[in-house]
Amino acid sequence: MAAKVLEKTANIELCHALLRERLHYDNYQKYHVRLRYRAAEPEGKEEYADVAWLEPYGFWADLADPWRPNSLGLRKQSLSRWELLPVTCRFDFQAGKSGAFFRDQYGGILLVHNGDILGGGGESLKTAFWHNYQGLRLEGAEQQESPLAVVAHLGSVDIARQIKDFLDEVARIRILDWLFE
């Protein structure tokens, strides 16, 4: 699949706004919660965020700003204020970080991830991710030496389901790594 990274500031901001729009992010109730990216994080080191609970899809998202890491996590039941939530995956849209937007050969916008996820102790599971990842890959894209996981097509009617499937895949990979470490 031929694709080009969208790295200009205006492009990233527009794609991030499109992602929010396609998920109907602003229509969901927001909860002020504490986020913990690493299971081994000491008490008091969590971050605070207002997250949207996308109840029909079983995940929550913090997509407030394209210039700080955007966190997402799986959840089966509703959220409550000040709750401590584990982060399943982060998208950082700054150059060379974990998330990016690409334009495919047909002009569509893709949300991609580089596979750099963290394990419970804060260690990188990037190798385990690529060894076990079963989703669509973007390989040989412009300015990319390593593969990227295609998370969602921003023009798709089922973008939320695509993101949920990716989060489920990340959770599955973490469990496999934990079981076979």
Image: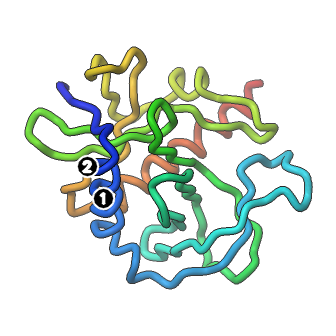
Q: CA distance from mark 2 to mark 1?
A: 6 Å
Q: Nearer the viewer, residue 20 or 151?
A: 20
- The tag on residue 153 is 2
**Image position, residue 24 (x, y; %):** 33, 74
Quarter of the image that includes the C terminus = top right
On screen, residue 142 versus residue 36, left or right, reads: left
On screen, residue 2 versus residue 49, left or right, reads: left
- The tag on residue 125 is none
Q: Is residue 41 above or below residue 157?
A: above
Q: How many marks?
A: 2
- The tag on residue 159 is 1
- Find numbered disc 1 in the image and state the secondary structure of the residue it sits on: helix
> Label 1 near label 2: C-beta < 8 Å?
yes
Q: Earlier in the sequence, mark 2 or mark 1?
A: 2
Residue situated furthest left in the rendering: 106
Q: Amino acid at mark 2?
A: His
